[in-house]
Structures are given as structure tokens and as C-alpha cells.
Amino acid sequence: MHMKNDFLEPSVLHQGQQVTIRKKKRRYFSNNCADRWLYPKRDLLYLVPQLSGFLLFYVYAFIVALRYSMLDNNARMAFVGIKHYMDVINNPYYQLALMNTIKFSFLSVLISLVIGYVLALLVFWHSAFRWVTNLGMLAFFLPSSALMMIWRILMSQHGTIANALYVLLPNVFSLNMWPEFSLYAFFIWRYLGVSILIYLSGLFRIEYHIIEAARLEGAGSWLISRSILLPLLTRTSMFNLVFMTVFSLRMFREVYLLYGAYPPQNLYFVQHYLSNHFARLNYQRLSAAAVLLAAFLSMLFMLIIHAFQKREQL
């Protein structure tokens, strides 16, 4: 009795068995080719709608803005080079808006990352505090208009909290500081839950035997969190940093709802500068400022990614 074996020599097998093996080989190679070439190309078809929208509404719009930024005006359409870029860079309002944007983004993102990591560790080590994540995500899903209504009632400049801080800390706190302070508080209130959730997703991906080995060596929770978990969360921290930076740049909407087109001087952002030139139909200055902002953010994100990649290689 002969056992069926596909690996026997062709001379040993009967003619029918050789035909069967050839069919199996043909079927194997055809499936292998389909897996390598046909299926990946078929999956790319699902990206066509999103890629088309990205090319039309982002890439093409950026090219049009780049073209407008180098023309004199909408009537003459004469090429002027970098004239509008120099005017925007030397404009004191743009300088003020850029400095305010950088300052707010840096401080708000830094605070959200630090507090988010601490609260994520609290939830990670003590599951009884799971409600912190749910409470933090509540404000994220509410619309901005509803949040602004609540914020005006609870955190107005002459409200209870502002007056209490003014009475308790008269030498440190003034009512003129309240708009900026309340905006930082609003950013933390709205986006802190996202920071906690991102850190938790990274913490729960870490293999638990690493933590157990550290505990066997006598390491406590603080040492594990600082020396083991934080270095392992490098990619998560980079993603969280980029995510929070994008959210900080979107705070113009909330500032506009609170203070209109002309907010207090320390809350005048680049988006206000862009919006005001758009209202005046000054598309050349608007395009130049938008291109400068895009270039600045691109360089910033590339530096962040390079710094984190260099840290991982150490």
C-alpha cells in the first residue's frame, strides 16, 4: 500500500499522480501571484476616494495658494516673487500672532502630555480609577457651541472662580490674565481625555512580564513608570505630541466663539490674522501667511519625528 506523498520523485509516481501534482503547483503559484500583486492592488482601490479628496482639497488648494502668494493682486496678476512673504514676516501683527500661537501650543501640549501621562499611570496601576478616562472623554464629544455656553456661565472673566483667584492671589493673579488662563484650562478640560486614552493604549500594549521582572528586582511603581514604561512609550508619546499639537491649533474656533474676530492681544493667533485678511479679500497676504505657517509646522513635525527616532536608536 503506497502512501500519497506530494514530495516523491516524478518517476516513482503514476501518470495520474504527476498530473495532480502539476495542477497543485499551478494552483499554488497562481494563488501566490494573486496574493502578491492582485490583492494589494485591489486594496488600493479603497483609498481612491480619500486620496482624490486629499489631492483636490489639500494638495491642489496648497498649489493655488502658493501661486496666489507670488502674484501682485487679483487684477494685475503680475509676478512679484517673495514680496508678500517679506511683508507678512515684517508685519507686527503676524509676529504677535505667531508668537502667541507658538506659546499657547507649547504650554498647552506640554501640560496635557504631563497630566495625561500621570492620570494614565493612575488608571493603569489602579483599575478603580477607570472613570477618569470616561470623564475626560465626555467634553471631547460635545460640540464647541455647547461647551462655549457652559464655559461662559462657569468661567467668565468676572465670574466666581476669577474673583476668588483675584482675592486669594492679588499679587500674582489679575483679571487681565484670566482670558489666557481660562483658555489653557479649557484646552485641558476638552482634550485631556484623548491624551489619557492614547497613553493607556500604549501602556496596555507593553508585555506585563517586563513589569513583573522589574518588581522581582525590587523596583517600585514610580521607578517602573519613570525608567521602564516611559522609554517604552516613545512612539506613543510622539503620536500624542503630534495629535495634541493639531488640537492646539484648532483652538482658534473656541477663541473666535468667545471673543470674536478681535480677541485680547495675548490670544491673537495666526488664524485670526488669516481670517481678517480673508474678510478683506486680501488673498495674496492670506496665501503667503498660510504657506509660511504650513512650512513652519512641517519643519516642526519633521524635527519632532527626527528627535524621537534618534532617541529610539540610543
Image (tube, helix red, strand yellow):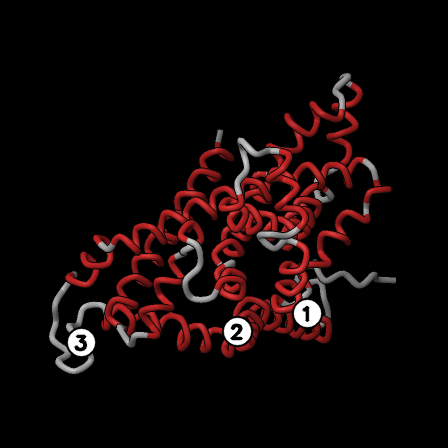
Tell me the residue at 62%/39% (across/down): 165
Tell me the residue at 27%/73% (across/down): 283
In this rendering, the label closer to the viewer, 3 or 1: 3
In the picture, residue 42 is in which quadrant? bottom right
**Tag 2 residue:** 47
**Tag 1 residue:** 21
If the image is split into quadrants, where does the N terminus sit?
bottom right
Q: Earlier in the sequence, mark 1 or mark 2?
A: 1
Q: Picture coordinates of residue 136 (x, y %)?
A: 72, 52
Q: Picture coordinates of residue 294 (x, y %)?
A: 35, 58
Q: Residue 227 — which label? A: none
How dense is the environment of label 2, judged by Cα within 10 Å: few (below 14), some, or many (20 and up)? few
Tell me the residue at 59%/39% (across/down): 166
Q: Give me the C-alpha separation between circle 3 and circle 2.
A: 38 Å
In this rendering, the label closer to the viewer, 1 or 2: 2
How many numbered discs, if any?
A: 3
Q: Picture coordinates of residue 65 (x, y %)?
A: 29, 71
Q: Give me the C-alpha separation between circle 3 and circle 1.
A: 74 Å
Which structural element holds mark 2? helix
**Tag 3 residue:** 73
Tell me the residue at 72%/37% (across/down): 121
Left/right placement of residue 25 relative to residue 285 reads right
In the picture, residue 237 is in which quadrant? top right
| Three-letter code for the amino acid on which mark 3 is drawn | Asn
Which structural element holds mark 1? helix
